[in-house]
Each structure stands twice: as C-alpha cells, then as structure tokens.
Image: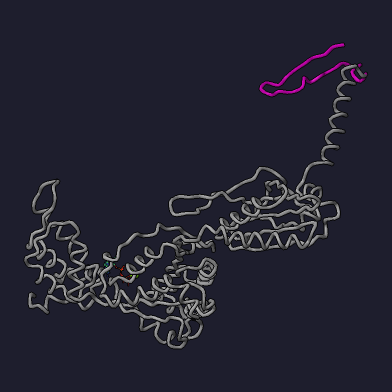
C-alpha cells in the first residue's frame, strides 16, 4: 500500500492521503476517525439543546408557567441613573432572602423586556454574561458610582420568586426597571420601594448641580456637580437694606421654616434679582448657595432652559432646594409661535405655581432685562414674591469694594477720595479690575521680580485714567460700566 503524505507549506492540516487503487477499503484508522466524528456531533447537538439563555434562566427561576405574569415597568430619566442604582442597591441590601445578578450581553439597540424574555421568543445575540458597569459622577470631587448597564436580578425569598431587569445608560434609550414576581402584588411593591429608596439615597441631595444640554446635541441631559462656594458676607458688598431683603426671602425663611409652617405660612418663594450687568447678581447667587449648606441647588443656564420641568421635579423631590435660573430674560425671549407668547417663561411660572405651598423650594431668578419680564410676571402674580434691584454701587459701597479687592495689598490711599468720586457710575467688577491694574502698574514700576507690591497714589490714578480712557470704551462695556460711566467728562478731565 503506497501512501504519500504532504503538507502544504505554512498550512497546518491533516496529512492528505493519496492512495493507490485499493484505497477505498476501510482501515482501522478510518473507523476510529468515524467514531470520533460521531461522538462530537452527538455531544454538540445535546449541548445546543440545553444552552443557558436569559429566557431559560428566568423560567427556571420563576417557574415554567411564568410566561403570562404581569410585568411592572418604571421609566426613569437618564440623568437619574445613579439614583436608580442607589435605590436598587438599597432595596437589595434590605430585602429578605437572596439575590443573584446576571449581566445581559448584546442588549444594545435592542428592544426587549422581561415579557419578551419570559416568552423566550428569538432574541438573537442576547445572552447572559458578565455584568457591565458604567461609572457615573456622584459628587463634585470626582466621586463616581458604578451603575449596571443592563442586568437581571433574580430574587428568591422562600417560595416567592421575583426578577428585576435594570436597563440604562444607552443613548436615546430610556432607563427602565421591570419587575415580575410569582406574587404580582409583590412586583408592584418592589418597583415602588425602589423608587422610594432612590429618593432616600438620592446622590443629588445637598449637592450643587447644574443642568445642561449636550453642546452637539444628542438630546442627552447633562448634569454636573459643582463645589459649593464658600463666601463670607463681607465678600458681598450691597447696601444693607438690599442684603437684608435677599437674606430674609431666602435664608431666614429656610431657618425658621418649622415655626412658619406651624403658623400656617407658606415656604415656597420666588426672588428676582435684577439690575445692570456686573453689579453682583451672580455673585449674590453664589453667596446664597454658600450660605444654604443643607439645600440642594439646581442651576439652569443658557442652553438648558428647556429642562425646567426636570429641574423643578428634582427640586420638588429633594426639598429644601433652591432652583436658580440665571438670565431668565433669555427664557422670555424664547418666543412661541405668536408674538408676545413666552412658552418657557410661562412654563417656569406654572412649575412654580404647581409646587405645594409648604415645599421648601426657593426660586432665584436673575436678569438685566427686567423690562422684558415685567408684563409676563404681572400677568401671573404671586410666583415671584420679591424683586430686589441691585444697583450700581454708591460711594459708600465703592469704598467697601475698594477695601475688599485691595485685600492685603499695600496701597497709598491719600488720593482715594478723588478716585472714588471719579468712579461714580461704574460697577463692582470695574473696581475689581481697577485694583488689579494698579497692582500691575506698581509691579512694572518697581522692576523687581519678587517682594511685596506697594501701590502708590499715582499708580491708582494711572490705572483709573487707563480704564476711563475713551480708547477703553469697549473694556468698560465688558466690565459692565455701561453708559453711566462717562466720568471723564463729568469730572472735567477730558
Ligand atoms: N456686590 C458685589 N460685591 C462684591 N463683588 C462684586 C459685587 N458685584 C460684582 N462683584 C464682582 O464682580 C464680578 C461680576 O459680577 P456678577 O457676575 O455678579 O455680575 P452680574 O450682575 O451677574 O452681571 P450680569 O448681568 O452680566 O450677569 C463678580 O464675580 C465679583 O467679583
Ligand atoms: Mg450674572
């Protein structure tokens, strides 16, 4: 029997057998080969039949007759994923019995839920696997919390069996929790308890958050955590009665809330801060955020104004809360189909109206276009119960601002009075910049690389001349000094 064996270069293969005319006769080796192939086929077929799928896991857990059980579904906004996970984790910690978490693989861009899994109908590619988690921000200092992207919790408690499918974190797909149980009422209870616990363990509570839309618009709501600013009262220079009005409305109501409630007074309140640019509206908001350390703060800015309803819902859930809408005139300018309609502004006012009277929620709105808002606010009275005007600083405030921004700097104040007179009509931010320029001139003048700076009266004058110079008109506009600041003519220097 002639047998040649060849292997192709670089290719691993069974030796190709070429035989002579008697090669159709079976040999012992052929029998062995046949038997091996047969065994492989039988084992493969048997294993395919019993491959573990999500459906089989569910049915094994809940019982074969579980196909028509009622599935309870709760849909959550995506930005709540950390809270939902906190709720689920808390529920599992407290739940009697045992549970097991199974990761779901191949879930992306796929419509499915517990009902489909229970029916076992073709979900090609969907299978049990490792639990994938996504780290989501849960605090301002890089705190993260690991959230399950898609997972099936199998919960056992004696005879009672339940399952929860948690799904979230994918673009355009809602965040959902679905629950099914051998005891239908218990499924409802699990869903409700998870929702309650998500509020109890809400990671947004007592945080400073801002809502924003994604710049390049995938329609996602972005939520950012911020550090709470620490600011003393003496860093906010306002006339005493202005500061008192703000304090009363926001801080004092919060402080005395139990007594006010007992006396039948409402806590919900709205404050409008208005005035020209650069006088400290945002600065006042910062001060308020810093003072109310136990309050959840939600800020809405620019592109996020359409998220008013979401922001209000977070504020309502996490009261005591402060909802800040800066530059609310932008809302007013977002006109509807008909002239004079301000759908977003009215939505904001409606949301304010919809809050329970005893909710400790304060709305703080800021604007430098009170004229735009007035008709809408007048048409719906009672939402904003205090409007506080922030004005350009008077001479007394300018002196205090000078002291504040001077800080520890050595300044020759012999001609300060004239400087303060010449700054009639400027903003707080103008004075802040004035101090910096004077310090810069002093640094340039003394020519040494280090050592403490000493600002002379001439440096201060020169810095002011520079800022008031007509060529600096644009800078003045940027500092918010506006048309009021034409003191060059007024004091006869031009
Ligand atoms: N009353 C103030 N006391 C102390 N500093 C102030 C005060 N007002 C403004 N400043 C300083 O000027 C800066 C700019 O002020 P701010 O951003 O609060 O102005 P604004 O009124 O919000 O203006 P806009 O209408 O442009 O938003 C502040 O960051 C702060 O440093
Ligand atoms: Mg501002």
Is residue 435 shown to the viewer in this render? Answer: yes
In the image shown, does 68 or 352 lie closer to the viewer?
A: 352
Q: Residue furthest top?
A: 1
Is 117 located above or below residue 12 in the figure?
below
Tell me which colouring the rendered structure shows: one colour
Left or right: 462, with 353 as reference point? left
Tell me the residue at 10%/71% (across/down): 417
Question: Is residue 339 visible from the viewing direction of this image?
Answer: no
The magenta span reads 1-25
x, y percent for residue 7 = 73, 19
Q: Quadrant of residue 331?
A: bottom left
Residue 421 lies, in percent from the top left, at: 12, 74
What x and y, as percent, mark residue 389?
31, 79
Closer-to-camera residue (372/439) = 439
Q: Indicate the quadrant of ligand 1 in the picture.
A: bottom left
The residue lying toward the viewer, choosing from 146 and 167, is: 146
Q: Position of residue 426 (x, y in %)?
A: 20, 73
- Farthest right residue in view: 25
Q: Is residue 48 magenta?
A: no
Rendered residue at 7%/67% (across/down): 415
Identify the residue at horizontal 71%, vertical 23% (top origin): 12
Secondary structure that dominates the magenta span: loop
Q: How many marks?
A: 0
Q: Nearer the viewer, residue 301 or 417?
A: 417
* In the displayed structure image, the side of residue 34 where residue 54 appears, left or right: left
Which quarter of the image is occupied by the N terminus?
top right
Image quadrant holding the C terminus, namely bottom left
Question: Seen in the image, is 410 located left or right of residue 18?
Answer: left
Quarter-wise, where is residue 256 in the image?
A: bottom left
Q: Is 466 rendered above or below residue 134?
A: below
| Residue 7 inside the magenta-drawn segment | yes
Viewed as shown, does residue 260 lie left or right of 147? left
């Amino acid at each position: 029997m002639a047998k040649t064996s060849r292997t192709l270069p670089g290719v691993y293969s069974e030796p190709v057998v070429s035989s002579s005319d008697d090669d159709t006769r079976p040999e012992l080796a052929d029998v062995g080969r046949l038997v091996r192939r047969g065994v492989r086929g039988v084992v493969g077929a048997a294993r395919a039949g019993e491959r573990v799928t999500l459906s089989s896991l569910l049915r094994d857990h809940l019982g074969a007759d579980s196909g028509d059980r009622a599935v309870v579904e709760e849909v959550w906004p995506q930005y709540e994923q950390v809270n939902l996970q906190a709720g689920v984790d808390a529920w599992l910690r407290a739940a009697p019995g045992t549970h097991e978490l199974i990761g779901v693989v191949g879930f992306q861009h796929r419509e499915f839920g517990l009902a489909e899994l229970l029916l076992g109908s073709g979900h090609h590619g969907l299978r049990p696997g490792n639990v994938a988690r996504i780290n989501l921000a849960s605090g301002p200092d890089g705190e993260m919390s690991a959230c399950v992207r898609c997972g099936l919790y199998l919960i056992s408690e004696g005879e009672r069996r339940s399952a929860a499918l948690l799904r979230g974190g994918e673009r355009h797909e809602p965040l959902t929790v679905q629950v099914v149980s051998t005891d239908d009422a218990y499924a409802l209870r699990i869903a409700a308890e998870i929702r309650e616990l998500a509020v109890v363990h809400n990671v947004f509570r007592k945080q400073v958050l801002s809502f924003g839309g994604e710049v390049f618009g995938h329609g996602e709501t972005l939520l950012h955590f911020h550090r709470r600013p620490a600011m003393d009262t003496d860093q906010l220079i306002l006339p005493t009665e202005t500061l008192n009005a703000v304090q009363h409305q926001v801080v004092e109501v919060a402080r005395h809330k139990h007594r006010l409630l007992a006396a039948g007074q409402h806590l919900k309140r709205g404050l409008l801060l208005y005035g020209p640019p650069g006088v400290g509206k945002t600065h006042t908001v910062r001060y308020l955020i810093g003072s109310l350390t136990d309050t959840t703060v939600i800020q809405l800015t620019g592109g996020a104004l359409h998220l008013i309803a979401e922001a209000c819902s977070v504020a309502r859930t996490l009261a005591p809360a402060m909802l800040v809408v800066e530059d609310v005139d932008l809302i007013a300018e977002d006109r509807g189909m008909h002239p004079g309609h301000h759908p977003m502004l009215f939505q904001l006012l409606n949301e304010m109206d919809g809050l329970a009277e005893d909710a400790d929620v304060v709305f703080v709105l800021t604007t430098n276009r009170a004229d735009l808002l007035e008709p809408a606010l007048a048409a719906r009275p009672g939402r904003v119960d205090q409007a506080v005007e922030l004005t350009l600083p008077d001479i007394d405030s300018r002196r205090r601002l000078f002291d504040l921004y001077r800080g520890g700097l050595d300044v020759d104040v012999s001609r300060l009075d004239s400087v303060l007179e010449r700054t009639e009509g400027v903003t707080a931010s103008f004075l802040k910049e004035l101090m910096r320029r004077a310090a810069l001139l002093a640094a340039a003048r003394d020519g040494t690389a280090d050592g403490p700076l000493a600002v002379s009266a001439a440096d201060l004058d020169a810095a002011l001349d520079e800022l008031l110079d007509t060529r600096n008109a644009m800078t003045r506009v940027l500092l918010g000094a506006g048309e009021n600041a034409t003191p060059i003519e007024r004091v006869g220097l031009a």
